[in-house]
Amino acid sequence: MGTNSATSTDAKGSMRMNAAFALLLIGMTAYFLWWGLDYTLHQQSFLFVIATLFGVFMAFNIGGNDVANSFGTSVGAGTLTVTQALVVAAIFEVSGAVLAGSEVTDTIRKGIVDLDGVNVSPNQFIYVMLSALIAAAFWLLFATKKGLPVSTTHAIIGGVIGSSIVLGFNIGGSEMALGTINWATIGQIAISWVLSPLLGGVLAYFLYGQIKKNIIDYNDKTEVHIHELKESKRALKENHKEFFENLSESLQLSYTSAMLRDQEVFKEEDCAREDLETDYYQNLYDIEHERKNLDTLKALKKWAPLIAAFGAVVMTSMVVFKGLKNVNSSLTTLHGLLFMGMAGALVWLATFIYTKTIRGKHKENLTKATFIMFSWMQVFTASAFAFSHGSNDIANAVGPFAAIMDVIRTNQIASHAAVPSAVMLTFGVALIVGLWFIGKEVIQTVGTNLAKMHPASGFSAELAAAAVVMGASIMGLPVSSTHTLVGAVLGIGMVNKNTNWALMKPIALAWIITLPAAAIMSAVSFVILGKIF
């Protein structure tokens, strides 16, 4: 009865959450439509509504696939619940997109398709971008329902290529069709697609390899040593009991007196082995002395502060060089380096002090003590990865949509389109709602099925992936955060020798066909839009 009641309560709570998120998305989209119709001067209102719905739909699916992929390691390691992941994503994904996503948005909007010298009408340009959004959104939905983490960057680029080829063919035949694509940029991006999982895997393999070697393996050996000492102590008591029972009554009496004297001496802080009379207390002294001199926290004290400081430096570099520099142009590289140094020093000191405060059972249950520490560290790496992910992949929805909205408003194709805050807020909400509704399958794939995760390995994967993705964002390359993080998870699995290579087959196949599938769907969408409008 109690179980059924609890299940019913959970179901009702889940239904309330589903309703709340659905209403949030509907309400936010309705507000944006009201605001956007006025912003676009009520020009081509029907086309703007269609573009908005598919733009929000694209952001929804990015949340379900890419954001779920980003937080899979945190949820799989047990560091964050899905609800907590939602909160972190809501803050840091949107912040990364607003503060640091402009360069990638420009690359997707302008660098992939070269329309200079081509007589393209504003509406044709809108159809190119809208077709790309439609194709990418539906492909992402399909992959997400299958639990396959794929690249939204691949999908949107494939979509832009497909619709641009059809546009070029309509204008000037097959030669023009291929001429609209900036193949040099595609080549650079293709190289980055290969490099990103390799770099993510290598960095995660090295980072987690060092953590496993210097902390986890040391802790395992220490816990075994502690267990052996406990067993020695237990055996000593049993052997002593047997020895005592075999003594004659007269010897038992004298031996008991010696034991009582040793008991009092043993309690003294300055007790030495030679002060003890009986073999039992001498052997007990040896065991306790060995246990006392065993530094169980040696590895954590030495390595955890250094690793945490490295993570702090990486995260600070993201915030400073890709966030604050866009807000404050007077911020110099020297200022940024000083901020990074201060953050690293403070985190090193805080982590070191934390290791000094570990007391009681945690000094012997080193696995639990280690994972508690790395859980805290993983919260920060999850935030950093969310920021770096937001700076890259939300642009896959915002970039094309911002271009569409700007063209509708001005009736001309500009070299750069501003991204109003209302767009970022609406698409950010859609992203979080998508994570809630359809993200669980991808979270399961990345966080559990591909390789088993715990806080230390999850921390390593996220930090490695965040560093690679943010470096690419600084260069303005729309790399795949999915490939980077999956590569990092594979690197972790290779260290632990538990990678599920069988699962990589459908994932790799999905990676290969994402771009051509999106291109074909986008080409079909472009033709249909041309017939409708």
Image (spheres, grey):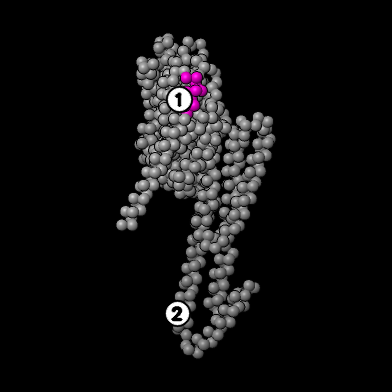
Closer to us: 44 or 240: 44
Identify which residue is drawn at 35% across, 36% down. Answer: 146
Whole-percent x, y for residue 202 in the image: 51, 39
Q: Magenta span covers which residues?
A: 32-42
Closer to us: 533 or 383: 533
Residue 392 visible within the image:
no
**Toward which corner of the image does residue 296 lie, by quadrant?**
bottom right
Q: Is residue 439 left or right of residue 110?
A: left
Closer to us: 374 or 229: 374
Q: Using a 10 Å C-alpha cutoff, classify the residue at mark 2 as few (fewer than 14 neighbours), some (14 to 19) or many (20 or more).
A: few
The quadrant of the image that shows the N terminus is bottom left
Q: Using a 10 Å C-alpha cutoff, classify the residue at mark 1 as few (fewer than 14 neighbours), some (14 to 19) or many (20 or more).
A: many
Q: CA distance from mark 1 to mark 2?
A: 79 Å
Mark 1 — residue?
157
Q: Is residue 254 left or right of residue 518?
A: right
Whole-percent x, y for residue 315 in the image: 58, 40
Helix, strand or loop under label 1: helix
Helix, strand or loop under label 2: helix
* 352 up-or-down from 516: above or below: below
Whole-percent x, y for residue 379 in the image: 52, 46
Whole-percent x, y for residue 485 in the image: 47, 38
The quadrant of the image that shows the C terminus is top left
* Residue type at tag 2: Glu
Mark 2 — residue?
242
